[in-house]
Amino acid sequence: MGPSGSGKSTLLHLLGGLDESTSGSVKVGDQALGSMSDDEVTQLRRRYIDFVFQAFNLLHVLTANENVALPLIIDGRNEAEGNDEQT
């Protein structure tokens, strides 16, 4: 929480691997994002980090459930696995 321009979004973008730091290092758990390949950061983000963007970027040709399930499908999992994880 803080005023506009205080770095809230920048911090979240760094932690999510959307931006790269210009100095220092960013770790998520024991993973240093700067030493990971783009594919590895994508896998980390896909499996462990959730984003809710102000502009939702939903695919209008999909239902709400299909939009939510899309990351699971891209990860080679099925929709039912997502339902199991919510319990």
Image (spheres, rainbow, N blue to C red):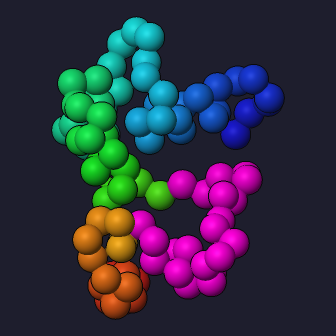
Q: Residue furthest front?
A: 61
Q: Does the magenta portion include 46?
A: no
Residue 17 shown left or right of residue 54 in the figure: left
* Residue 84 higher or lower than 29, as above or below: below
Specify the quadrant that holds the N terminus. top right
Residue at image coords 37%, 50% = 45
Q: List x then y, in percent, for residue 17.
A: 41, 36
Query: Secondary structure of the magenta portion, mostly?
Result: loop
Image location (x, y in percent) of residue 79: 38, 85
Position above or below: 63 against 75: below
Identified at 28% across, 23% down, the residue is 34
Quarter occupied by the C terminus: bottom left
Vertical relation: 64 (above or below) 18: below
Residue extending furthest toward the top: 23
Residue at image coords 64%, 33%: 8
Residue at x 29% of width, y 49% of height: 44
Between 25 and 3, the one nearer to me in the picture: 25
Stretch of the chain drawn in magenta: 51-71
In-front residue for pair 58/51: 58
Q: Is residue 24 left or right of residue 62?
A: left
Q: How many marks?
A: 0
> Which quadrant of the view contains residue 64?
bottom right
Residue 65 in view: yes
Residue 14 image offset from top left, x and y in percent:
47, 31
Which sits in the foreground, 36 or 23? 36
What percent of the width, then of the height, locates residue 46? 36, 56
